[in-house]
Image (cartoon, grey):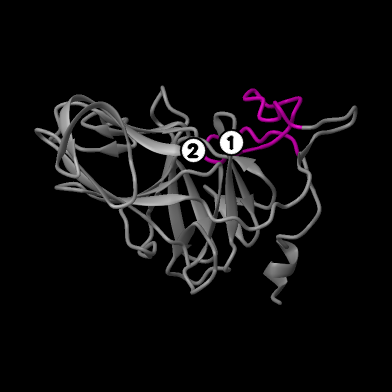
Amino acid sequence: MSLSDTKYSDTKPGIQLDKVMNQSETGSHINNKDSKHDTSRGLESNDRETTYFSSRVSMSVAESFQIWIDGVGGYRLLLADQVMIGQAVPHSGVDVPILADLSRRHAWIRRVGSDYVLDPLSPTSIGKQVATQPTVLRDNNTIGLGRNVGLRFRKQHPLSSSAVLTMISRQRMEPACDAVVLMGESCILGPNTRNHIVCPKWQEDVVLFKKNGILQVKVKQNYLIQGRPVTGIQEIKESTSVQGEDFSFFLERVETS
C-alpha cells in the first residue's frame, strides 16, 4: 500500500466538518454553522459538531445509461446520488472509469440536497487547493486527480440540481464519452447553452427525468420511440431510440465493470 493510499484510506470511520473556505477558485469545506449553502441540512448532528459522513458506504455501482445523440456526441448519465471516480481497470466497480494513472477508487462525488460534495480517497485538488476532506463543489470548479488528470465540474442550469463532468486533460473516460451527467431529477437536452447537453440544431428542449427510479422522457412535439408514434411522457427502457422532427438519440444501459 502506498503512502497516498494510507493517507486517503476509503475505510476510515468518519470525517468531521471543517471551516468554510472562501476562495473563489476552490470549493468550500463543509461547516454546518458557517456555510452559506447549509450543506449539513438533513444530516445527523449533536451539540458540538456534525459528522458529514458517519461512515464510508459500501461500494455500489450507479445505475447508468449511455446516450448517443446524432450530430452531437455521446454522454454518460449516472442516476445515483453518489458516484465513484477511479481508474478504468476490469472489475473496479467505479462509476466514472478513467484511463489514467489513478487509484482504483480515487474519489467520491455525492449529491446532498442541491449541492455536490467531493470526497477524496487519493491525492485530489480543487483548483489550486489540495483537497483532503469533503468539499462542496462550485460551478466551473476544476478537479485534479493524481498527477495529471483534470476534470471540470459544471452546474449551470438554474432549474435543475444535475451537474456535468467533462475531461480537460488528455485522458479519456471508459467507455469513451464527451461528458458525464450527474443526474439529479432531470437531464435537459436542447439548444440552450446552459443545458446539461447542448444540442445547437434542435428547436426545443427534450427532458429526461427520473420518476420512482425509472428514467422517462418528455417531449412537447409528437415523436417516435422505437419507431412507434407517441406523445407526452414515456418510459425509457434498455436500448431505446427516440426521434423527433429535428432530433434523434439512442439510449442504452451501461454495465459497469
Tell me where residue 150 sits by quadrant.
bottom left
Could you tell me the amino acid type at mark 2? Gly
Q: Is residue 168 left or right of residue 143?
A: left
Instruction: State the SS at label 2.
Output: loop
The residue furthest front is 228
Using the image as rendered, state which of residue 125 and residue 232 is in the foreground.
Answer: 232
Q: Is residue 166 left or right of residue 84?
A: left
Instruction: State the SS at label 1.
Output: loop
> Would you call the spot at circle 2 few (<14 residues within 10 Å), some (14-19), or many (20 or more)?
few
Query: Residue 213 shows which numbered tag?
Result: 2
Could you tell me the amino acid type at mark 1? Gln
Residue 154 visible in the snapshot? no
Residue at the spot 64% in from the left edge and 23% down from the top edge: 36
Query: Residue 69 shows which numbered tag?
Result: none
Locate the N terminus and report the quarter of the image it occupies.
bottom right
Estimate the x, y position of residue 74 in percent, counting from the top left: 27, 52
Query: Residue 23 shows which numbered tag?
Result: 1
What secondary structure do most residues of the magenta stretch adopt? loop
The residue furthest right is 47
> Would you call the spot at circle 1 few (<14 residues within 10 Å), some (14-19), or many (20 or more)?
few
Tell me where residue 162 sits by quadrant.
top left
Q: Is residue 142 left or right of residue 1?
A: left
| Start-end of magenta stretch | 18-43
Q: CA distance from mark 1 to mark 2?
A: 37 Å
